[in-house]
Image (cartoon, rainbow, N blue to C red):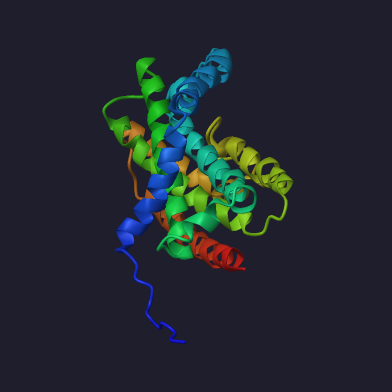
């Protein structure tokens, strides 16, 4: 019996990554109204509940900005963080363990690395879309200045990509879906309050400020606020370096861990 030693042929890399991205896009837009409407509604609810309610008691500017603008610029990236965290934790686990989506995808001419990087790019795209949705709402109410804020969705993509790498890394360890509660309750939710979104990091106690500088959302908030207010300074280079290093390190760890789990 003759055995074929022919090496499997793969399409170009961009086509393999696009195929993963396109599969998720088709699935997501299948229910475009129910999936696409909440991103426009949630910031209105949050601004009404926190910004307008609490903001009336904040007479002084916060870091040179009216409080509602200070809060709104931070929300542009927090929505990207939550989107990527859910997509690459619960979403990835469901595709991996319950729906067995990855089994079918890997039957196509793509590698496990392509699949994982495609997941990251899709999460980044959702972050861009959600940040754009928040920007639209904030712009209608005059909360964020235009046209400088038009670049904020790009920061949404970067933020979502960064959090997708960490969430995929966490997902590679999780054996039951309920374990993600520790990730969200113990890390993601506290980070929302200690990263300069609701109030400045400098107002925190001295022993908490190092934690704020350690977590990734702080650096995204610094950058998006600088973009929206057109207030650039050399200190932002540290924020850029942090995001690049964080994404590369956790991206490589996520690929290594998930590749082993997918193959096994």
Q: Position of residue 89 (x, y in %)?
A: 60, 47
Residue at x 37%, y 31% (from the top left corner): 132
Q: Position of residue 83 (x, y in %)?
A: 52, 38
Q: Nearer the viewer, residue 125 or 5?
A: 5
Q: Position of residue 12 (x, y in %)?
A: 29, 63
Residue at x 42%, y 57% (from the top left corner): 244
Residue 222 visible to the viewer: no
From the viewer's perspective, tell me whether residue 187 is left or right of residue 51: right
Furthest residue toward front: 1
Residue at x 65%, y 39% (from the top left corner): 190
Residue 188 visible to the viewer: yes
Task: Please tell me whether residue 38 is drawn above or below residue 105 in the rendered image.
Answer: above
Furthest residue toward left: 147
Q: Position of residue 222 (x, y in %)?
A: 44, 41
The C terminus: image quadrant: bottom right
Task: Please tell me whether residue 111 is drawn above or below residue 196 in the rendered image.
Answer: below
Task: Please tell me whether residue 228 is drawn above or below residue 125 in the rendered image.
Answer: above
Furthest residue toward bottom: 1
Residue at x 64%, y 52% (from the top left corner): 97
Q: Quadrant of residue 126?
A: top left
From the viewer's perspective, tell me whether residue 175 is left or right of residue 58: right
Task: Please tell me whether residue 132 is drawn above or below residue 103 in the rendered image.
Answer: above
Q: Nearer the viewer, residue 65 or 156?
A: 156
């Amino acid at each position: 019996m003759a055995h074929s030693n022919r090496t499997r042929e793969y399409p170009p890399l961009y086509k393999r990554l696009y195929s993963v991205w396109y599969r998720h896009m088709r699935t997501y837009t299948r229910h475009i109204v129910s999936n696409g409407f909440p991103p426009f509604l949630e910031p209105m609810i949050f601004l009404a509940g926190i910004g307008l309610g609490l903001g009336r008691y904040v007479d002084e500017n916060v870091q040179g900005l009216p409080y509602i603008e200070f809060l709104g610029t931070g929300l542009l990236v927090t929505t990207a963080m939550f989107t990527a965290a859910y997509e690459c934790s619960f979403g990835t686990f469901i595709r991996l363990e319950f729906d067995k989506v990855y089994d079918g995808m890997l039957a196509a001419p793509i590698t496990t690395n392509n699949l994982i990087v495609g997941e990251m790019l899709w999460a980044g795209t959702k972050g861009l879309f959600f940040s754009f949705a928040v920007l639209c709402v904030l712009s209608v109410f005059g909360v964020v200045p235009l046209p400088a804020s038009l670049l904020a969705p790009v920061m949404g993509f970067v933020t979502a990509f960064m959090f997708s790498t960490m969430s995929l890394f966490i997902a590679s360890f999780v054996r039951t879906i309920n374990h993600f509660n520790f990730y969200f309750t113990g890390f993601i939710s506290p980070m929302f309050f200690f990263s300069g979104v609701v109030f400045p990091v400098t107002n925190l106690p001295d022993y908490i400020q190092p934690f704020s500088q350690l977590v990734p959302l702080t650096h995204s908030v610094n950058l998006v606020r600088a973009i929206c207010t057109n207030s650039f300074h050399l200190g932002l280079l540290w924020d850029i370096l942090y995001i690049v290093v964080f994404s590369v390190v956790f991206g490589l760890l996520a690929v290594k861990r998930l590749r082993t789990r997918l193959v096994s």
